[in-house]
Image (tube, grey):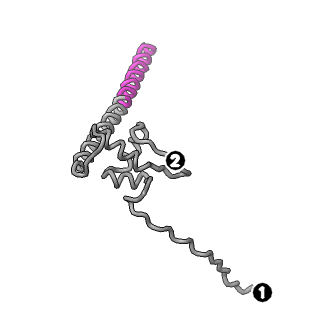
């Protein structure tokens, strides 16, 4: 005899309360994505700045948080100015992007040189092995 299928039990959870949306200008700290938006950079560039110690960040759980003051300090230091007037913001962003791009290019160049050196070593090893086999065969 077949049993009738029971209707599924539906358990509803109370909705999570909505957090208020804080405008970016009012935030004391931002995420990597928000910092990238603020500085008109990509998240990879922001992570590189953190990794190289140019911007200090704090890990909270899985999130990485950057103080707004830290971003302002970095931008001012990159421009060599103690206080940056708003009219210089575009120039400052361009300078920061150029320096970050150069740092990323230098890092990529160094990594490429390591790969080339490793490949050359493998070629030398293969040539030595081939020469050894030819010497053993004769």
The segment highlighted magenta reads 114-138
Where, quadrant-wise, is the N terminus in this rendering?
Answer: bottom right
Q: Would you identify the image quadrant in which residue 96 lies?
A: top left
User: What residue is disc 2 on?
Assistant: 59
Secondary structure character of the magenta stretch overall: helix
> Is residue 53 depicted above or below 30 in this figure?
above
Instruction: Say whether residue 54 is left or right of residue 90.
Output: right
Q: Position of residue 122 (x, y in %)?
A: 41, 26
Between the C-alphas of marks 2 and 1, the distance is 60 Å
Crowd around label 1: few <14 · some 14–19 · many ≥20 (10 Å): few
> Is residue 27 depicted above or below 19 in this figure?
above
User: What residue is disc 1 on?
Assistant: 1
Residue shown at the point (50%, 46%) measured from the top left: 58
Residue shown at the point (25%, 45%) measured from the top left: 92
Q: Secondary structure at mark 2?
A: strand
Contact between marks 2 and 1 (CB within 8 A): the answer is no
Query: Which of labels 2 and 1 is toward the front?
Result: 2
Q: Secondary structure at mark 1?
A: loop
Residue shown at the point (44%, 18%) measured from the top left: 133
Q: Position of residue 136 (x, y in %)?
A: 45, 14
> Is residue 16 depicted above or below 59 in this figure?
below
Q: Nearer the viewer, residue 69 or 97?
A: 69
Q: Position of residue 110 (x, y in %)?
A: 35, 31
């Amino acid at each position: 005899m077949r049993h009738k299928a029971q209707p599924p039990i539906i358990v509803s959870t109370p909705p999570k309360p909505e957090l208020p949306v804080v405008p970016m200008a009012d935030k004391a700290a931002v995420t990597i994505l928000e910092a990238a938006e603020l500085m008109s950079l990509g998240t990879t560039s922001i992570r590189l700045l953190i990794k190289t110690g140019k911007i200090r960040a704090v890990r909270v759980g899985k999130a990485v948080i950057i103080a707004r003051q830290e971003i302002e300090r970095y931008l001012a230091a990159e421009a060599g100015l103690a206080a940056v007037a708003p009219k210089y913001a575009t120039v400052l962003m361009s300078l920061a992007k150029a320096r970050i791009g150069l740092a990323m290019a230098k890092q990529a160049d160094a990594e490429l040189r390591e790969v080339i050196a490793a490949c050359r070593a493998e070629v030398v090893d293969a040539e030595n092995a081939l020469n050894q086999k030819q010497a053993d065969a004769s």
